[in-house]
Amino acid sequence: MYIDLHTHIKLSKKTSFSMEYFNQAIYEASQAGLDAIAMTEHFNTENFYHIYEQLDAHYPYREHYYDVNGFKVFPGMEIDVDKRGHILVVGTRTTILELRHRLEPFTAKESFVSFEQLLDWCDELQLLRMGAHPHRESNPLLQHSLTLLQRLDAFDINGKDLATYGASMEEQVQQLAAQVGIPVIVGSDTHHPLQFGCVRNKLDREYSSYSDIRTCIQEGRYHYEISDALPLHVKSASLVKKLLKERGDVLVPIS
């Protein structure tokens, strides 16, 4: 099973959720060779709960994922923590919505949950948790203690960062993961469908449960792939995203 573990299905935090845009994103993800995504939308995105209300109205939820015409969409979030850094979490619909409820006091500007508190909640709710783009200059994770970093399940080799910083970013994240003692996965960090396919994780078989995916990662029964066309994927997506935001338009034609 090919899965992207860091994705966004809205153009930006301030953009309204659109089923048409979502469906186009899933179409492009499928065309890029993916079988599944972790929908790690920002926890403080506009009208977060509306996303789940719309998905519940349009698609069946099976075990731990939304079934979008055979394509699997696992619920998740990207969360800002105190002292900088972003954490990706993946779980069931119920546990993700419960965590989002607990994070409500931290949606105000300059209000951040502590990394330790978030990890405690992740333990309680049994969530898969990954350190997003740990070497990104604007939101690194290196300032946090080794003890806290070791409570993560993996670090994210980020598609956007690979395009921004170059191929050396892969080695830097690999080295950090080795020091901390956790695996690495890849995530496109896409906000636009054109970025799907720049990276993907190949799991050893099909999974319908996020907890089984977590075990697969922990046991190393997967590998990741980085597309030779990654710079083109990211640059194209970034340019179209910029143009759409300037126009106030979130839709793109299906090719």
Image: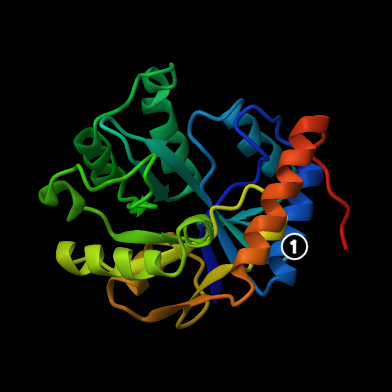
Element class at badge 1: helix
Where 23 falls versus 171 (above or below)?
above
Q: Is residue 220 visible?
A: yes
Residue at 60%, 77% in the rendered image: 228
Residue at 44%, 70% in the rendered image: 167
Where 108 falls versus 8 (above or below)?
above
Q: Position of residue 6 (x, y in %)?
A: 50, 55
Badge 1: how crowded within 10 Å, few (<14), some, or many (20+)? many
Q: Position of residue 160 (x, y in %)?
A: 53, 55
Q: Quadrant of the C terminus?
A: bottom right
Q: Position of residue 55 (x, y in %)?
A: 68, 43
Q: Quadrant of the N terminus?
A: bottom right
The amino acid marked with disc number 1 is Glu
Judge by depth and name the residue closer to the eye, 189 or 41.
Answer: 189
Residue at 38%, 64% in the rendered image: 169
Q: Is residue 40 left or right of residue 115?
A: right
Q: Is residue 220 left or right of residue 96?
A: left
Judge by depth and name the residue closer to the eye, 90 or 146.
Answer: 146
Q: Is residue 208 left or right of residue 123?
A: right
Coloration of the structure image = rainbow
Q: Which residue is mark 1?
A: 28
Judge by depth and name the residue closer to the eye, 245 or 64.
Answer: 245
Q: Quadrant of residue 33?
A: bottom right
Q: Position of residue 206 (x, y in %)?
A: 52, 77
Where 56 falls versus 180 (above or below)?
above
